[in-house]
Structure formats: structure tokens, C-alpha cells
Amino acid sequence: MAVDSPAPVSTAIAPVSVERIRSIIAELAADDFKGRRIGTPDGLRAADRVASWMGQAGLRPVGPAGFQLRFTSGRLNGVNVVGMREGTDPGLKDEVVVICAHHDHIGINDRGVNNGADDNASGVAALIEVAHAIRKLRLRRTVVFASFDGEETGLVGSQAFVKAGPFDPKSFAALICMDLVGGDFYPGDSRGLYALGAESGRSLRDLVVAEAARESDLEVRPLGIYAIEPMGPLIPRSDYASFRSAEVPFVFFSTGTPWYYHTPHDDPERINLDKLRSNVGFIARVLAALADAPVRPGFVRSPPLPNGDAEGFAGQMEKILGNPGLRIEPAERDRLGAAVAELRKLSGSDADAKVKGLIQRSIVALLGIIQRSRPEK
């Protein structure tokens, strides 16, 4: 049975509400949530609020128990919050596009309350706002919105969802994962959004690149997931890994790991709301394109080095080396400059392992520079 074609994605995405984003982040990252650690009363309160926001966004629960799906992992008791929109195409609605963030954080430690505004109240706010943005679209595939618990304690919430959730993982056409999507990676990086891992799905990176080409407010940076996994997939960076283990194609969106990562300085005032507004609009368009694509991406087990990584990363590093807000030692500048020159020579070659190594080492060096360049306060 045929269905009407949806309105063009570029014109049908609803305007993004910065005020709603601001309100969600301000509430989740307030001191009285005490860092939203899994298994605490405050973590449970956070799950309650996410469930309420999902209902307000027009999502429906995935089961009779409501939006909240409780799970146990070892001694940890957590709550995933999951809502959905059923697809409109009888032939495709049994395929599921998942979009996720995580609502837990690391709680209180000897440094104080870790409010986790960017990590990952920003991702939860984006999740809810994407649901509002696509509310009027008629998408072929079913879309599941998942806010996971326990990301900070070994991805236990997303693992429970994939292994024993209400859906067969074989039905997952693709995953969009959002973690730290509201900050500036380094001083002046007010437009950058990384799109990592899309090489895991046939045609997925092409879809992301095509949507990025239409962006005027963002600098979307596609990059292989290896770039943030210098020790390999055994030490992943977010909930995308639970889906990768089930051979689900994914793209991981992040603005990067800033100096205030996992510190009490990760507060709402550090969020770049203009960038986050643009991020939400872009991610909503990617989600809608995935949910409406005639063919699901298909998982790629051992993807080659994505075309463009060497040249693209070399260009980013050149800008970073010219950034006056970063404190780069002369020896570091020489090493990173040499890496940029080497990447330019290797661009288009078959030297995958060398390119990956240069990019991984450069990112590790950059993280150290960012920490050194943090504000005095």
C-alpha cells in the first residue's frame, strides 16, 4: 500500500526552541540533582523529568509500564527512558531508527557537585527538542527516542536496552548518539560539530555529508570513530558502542571534550545555546532523512579509512595551530605542524594505519593543550 510522500525535510523541521533547551539544561544541571548518578534518588528524579518531557513532545511509551524501563546491572539499578513515534509505511515501520543521549552523570566527589550541563544535559535537551522538531513529519520508519542511564558506569543502560529491551536489535536500521553537544571544544570553536563513526553504515556517511553541505550555521566535521578510540573499540567513548556490538550502523555527534569535562565547572552557563540550536536542527534533518530513506544503511564490520579524513583533519589542525586562545608550546607546534604536512602527503593514499595513528596522536596532544589553555577561573 502506497503512502503519501512526506514534506521535504529542509522545510518541514519545526523551529527549534532555545528557551525549552535552556530550561531543560538548567533543571537537569542544577545543584539539587547532585550530579544525577545512576541508582541515586536524584538519578531517579532525572528519569522522571525526562519521561515528562517525552510526553510533552508527543512521544508515546514503548510499553504498558510507561516511558521508564528499569534494569539491573550487577549492583546497579537504573532507569532508561524511552519513547517512540511509529512509522507510516507498512513496509518499513518495523524498522527502527534510534536516537539517544544519556541523562546520568558522575554525581558528587571530593571536588564538589558535578552538574554535567554539557555531559549530558545538553544531549537530553537535544533529544527532546529533536522530538518536537519532527513532530509533524510523516516518517516511514519508526523512530525511538532513548535517554539512557548508566553511561558513566560502563554504558550499562544502553547495553541493557540492546540486549533485553522492547525491540529486537535486528530491527534497528541505524543509531544517532548525542553526547556533549552543547559546548565549544576549544576557545573560538563556536561552530564545530563532529560527526563520528558514520563509516559504520553503507551510505550513512554520504547522507551525513549531504546534509552537512546544506548547513550555513555549522561546521560539521565527519571523522572516523577510530579518532577518539586510540586504544581501539574495547575502550569506547559513549553509548554508540552498545549498538555497534549488535552491528547497528551509527553516527556519534559531539562538540568535543572541553576543558571542563567531568569537573564541577560543567555548568549551564558554559553551554553555547546558539550552537546547540543549530545542532538540533541539523541532527533532526539527519534523523528524518534516515527514517525516510528507501534503504537502510547496512552495517560495515571493518570499514576502511573514510575518504577525506586526512585532508579534513589537516585543515582543522591548521586552524587550531593559528588559534590565539590556545597555549601551544613550540615543540608541540613543530610536532603538530609536521603531522599536518604528513597528513597532506598521505591524503588519497592507501596508508590507512599511518593516517589513523597521526590523527589519534594529534587529538591526544590537542586534549592536553585544551586542558592547559583553560580559563584561570
Image (cartoon, grey):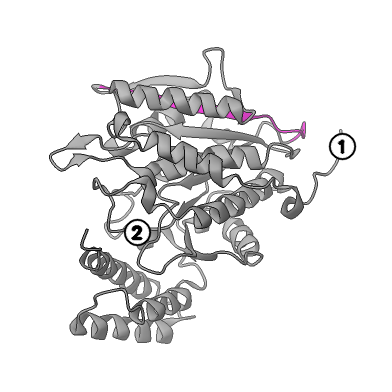
Question: Does the magenta portion include 87?
Answer: yes
Numbered circles on residues, count:
2
Quadrant of residue 20 in the image? top right
Q: Residue at 51% of width from left, 73% of height from top?
A: 308
Q: Does residue 149 appear to the left or right of 190 in the view shown?
A: left
Closer to us: 66 or 27: 27
Residue type at the position of mark 2? Ile
Q: Does residue 60 appear to the left or right of 220 in the view shown?
A: right
Tell me the SS state at disc 2: helix
Disc 2 versus disc 1: distance between alpha carbons?
Answer: 43 Å
Q: Earlier in the sequence, mark 2 or mark 1?
A: 1
Q: Residue at 57% of width from left, 56% of height from top?
A: 278
Q: Does residue 116 appear to the left or right of 1 in the view shown?
A: left
Q: Residue at 24% of width from left, 45% of height from top?
A: 264
Question: Does the magenta portion include 368?
Answer: no
Closer to us: 155 or 246: 155
Callout 1: few (<14), some (14-19), or many (20+) C-alpha neighbours within 10 Å?
few
Q: Position of residue 204 (x, y in %)?
A: 59, 55
Q: Nearer the viewer, mark 2 or mark 1?
A: 2
Q: Which is the main secondary structure of the residues drawn in magenta? A: strand
The single residue placed furthest to the top in the displayed view is 64
Location of the N terminus (image quadrant): top right
Residue ID for mark 1: 2
The single residue placed furthest to the left in the displayed view is 110
Closer to us: 161 or 354: 161
Location of the C terminus (image quadrant): bottom left
Quadrant of residue 47 in the image? top left
Residue type at the position of mark 1? Ala
Q: Position of residue 53 (x, y in %)?
A: 53, 29
Q: Position of residue 189 (x, y in %)?
A: 42, 67
- The label on residue 228 is 2
State the extent of the magenta-drawn residues as a range.
76-91
